[in-house]
Amino acid sequence: MSSSVLACVRLPSPTSPKQRFPNPKSSTPQNPSLISSPKIAASSKSRSLSLNSALSRFIKSGLLHDAIQLFDAMTHRDTYTWNLLIKGFVDHRLFEEAFDLYRRMESEGIRGDHFTFAFVIKACGGMLCLAEGERIHAKVMKMGLNGDVYVGNCLLGMYSENGRMDMADKLFGEMTGKDLVSWNSMMSMFVSVGDAVPVLRLLREMHSFGMEPDRFSLINSLSAVSVGCCLHIGKEIHCRAIRTGLETDFMVQTSLINMYFKCREVDYAEKMFYYCGCSMENIVTWNVMVDGYASNDQFMKSIACMRRMQDEYKLTPDKISMINVLPACAQLGELLLGKSIHGHVLRKGVVPDVVLETALINMYGECRKVNNSETIFSRMAEKNLVTWNSMAAALVRNGREKDALTFFLELWHEQLALDEMTIATILPAYAEVALLREGKQIHSFIVKSGLSSNTFVLNSLVFMYAKCGDLDTAREIFDRIMFKDVITWNVIIMAYAIHGHGRSSIHLFSEMIEKGVKPNKNTFVSLLMSCSISGLIDEGWLYYELMKKGYGIDPGIDHYGCMLDIIGRTGDFPLARRFIEDMPLVPNARIWGSFLTACRKHKNIEMAEYAANHALSLDHDNTGCYILLAKLYAEAGRMSDAERIASVMRQMGIKKTVGRCQIESAGAIHKFVNGDQNHEAINMVYNVLHIISRRTGYETSTHDSIRLRPRDPASKAAFSTVTHGVRLAISFGLISTQVGRPVLVRMNTRICEDCHGFAKRASISSQREIVVGDTKMFHHFREGHCSCGDYW
């Protein structure tokens, strides 16, 4: 026995094998004539059978140490004996040891049979050793065993496990004899890589070869239908299951339910579950139901299904149950239930489990508890690429874009093969905090990674360019996408919306419908946002009604927020208040923030106080609400109220976000803050600002009054907007970028009214387009006009 075999499975044994089975070589020599007699030969054969039987019992019981010692003590080891031990190693997943034993068998001159090669081929698949597998395949062909169905099936499995679908497909085509295992193996192989088309082709070929599919054939076919969402084929397979009597098979029923859910036919799935005799006592079926509801955005039903499984049928949720219900908790913001599940898995010792822990990271990220996500991530014993992607997504979702980019660099150094999900997850972070140059760098990486034709990645790339201010490049990429899905259209409609091109968004929506793409709830969020930003009041109401009556989509909080923006533009506050009161959803900070913005725009202090009282009662970051209310009081001359709000902010430790502006010039990024004195070209910038201010009517009394920070509080109020970072960035851009090209500035706050007016006048005096991207939209200033229509 090779040392590697013994080293792996050597265990202490109370009894030496030599004591159990004396070594014939050390026994007293016997008379050759006695050995050769028929009676002695029969006795030897009987003893060999008995030893093989004992060897088989040791292996089946998992006593491999005893099996090895017995094997080494045997004087007669035929092919059957070697096969027993090789198979035992393979069954116990000791693939390298099995292969070492086969080599020893070869060295001792024992000829293997088709069983030997079948077991050795399985070992090659388990070791993921394609080279050895191909060598065994060649030997099988030389020995004329390539026509053996069992050996052929093992070869199919070996090539599949090594990821060589092409070689498996070629071998399958060359096999002269195929049984159901052969067909099912091929179907299972293609299902494992998510390739649905070959599976359905194989199902048709089975029928043409006169081969009747069994339960595994139907299960594999239904899995393929689920991947490809081919409902009509799924119904055909359902009919075939009924004809063959396999519809009552538990595994087939569960696969049918899953298929209908994946094809978004929830009613069919429910009928299969409730009316077709599915076992209510089997947790596997319940798990499919929980996942199916969550996958079809019916999150309340998903959680209710989980509870019914426990309360009515007394089934204890397993790991899969919890993985399946966590997305529903995330989407509904059911943090308490999510924490309960987390506590349950800790008590039951289910973790560490990479899939479950990744689901928990997602749940906490969706519930705005990203610190919990970070804690789970840091404590995980094992992490895969999905885990890293989930953690990055949690950071992006919670507005921690810079942390997400740092995290992305850590992932890069882990040397994992980044996939399309990684890129699509990190691109929104680049969109929020990066400038165009950095966006182009990540675009170059996408091209080099071979992901430039992936629709999922390209959708995120369109979003990134739009958020970086380059709408033209965003549109170019959109036009080059070969397979445009609903997300593709949603992103480009949103892109034109945030740039104030509402009519273009409406045109794109019409084109989307003409192409036969069915809009979803996010489509209407983008469309209503476009109407809101561009002031398209009538069109906004039209699409709001169309969403409900034409497509049966119930409005969500974002739809109501957009409609409130549209109503706010009209200044009809009684209608706005009724609209909020009639909402079937509890108004959140988004709703009250929209209402408060409209109040400030129309100088309605009474309604602003009404909105602020509701907004401040929510558990939310209310910094913006306090600042808006303080500004409204100050603009109305109610300085005591403004000071009261400022005092409250100081007591609560609330600080106004420090305004920062960025502009790219000559391949470098330049940053400005309000009253900046540190930029290398600050003297020139202030000189340019002085000239523009004089030309546009924003001239100040002296040069120093612009340049120097006022120390007196009263002076600060007078000059608070004169040296805002956005004005400094625009001034720098006008002298540092190519003449005739737009000046693009990014802000981390909303642009104030004074700076908005300055930018409009600067676009006239400079005869250039000035683009300012704030936290809501991009303001395109051309010839004294802004794309927002002076409402933002």
Image (spheres, grey):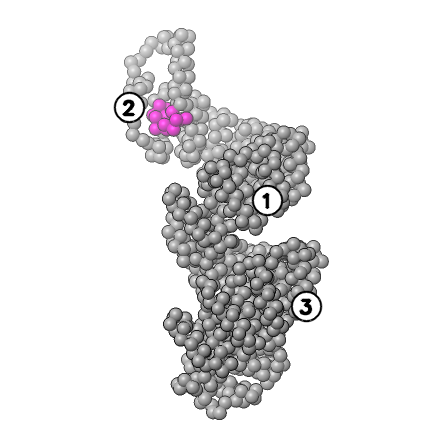
Circle 1 sits on which residue? 261
Relative to 683, is 379 above or below? above
Q: Quarter-wise, where is residue 682 in the image?
A: bottom left
Residue at 70% from the left image edge and 61% from the top image edge: 511
Amino acid type, callout 2: Thr
Is residue 619 left or right of 513 when viewed as pictured?
Answer: left
Camera-side mark, 2 or 3: 3
Which badge, 2 or 3, comes first in the chain's sequence? Answer: 2
Q: Which residues are magenta?
A: 58-71
Visible residue check, residue 674 = yes
**Mark 2 residue element:** loop
Is residue 152 left or right of 234 when viewed as pictured?
Answer: left
Residue 476 spot, x, y in % from top left = 63, 65
Relative to 156, is 673 above or below? below
Label 1, label 3: how far apart the Cα atoms are = 38 Å
Circle 2 sits on which residue? 15
> Residue at the bottom extreme?
701
Visible residue check, residue 773 = no
Amino acid type, callout 3: Asp
Magenta highlight on residue 644:
no
**Mark 3 residue element:** helix
Residue at 34% from the left image edge and 26% from the top image edge: 66
- Give the quarter of the figure containing the N terminus: top left
Residue 217 spot, x, y in % from top left = 60, 34
Residue 745 spot, x, y in % from top left = 53, 74
Q: Quarter-wise, where is residue 771 in the image?
A: bottom right
Circle 3 sits on which residue? 538
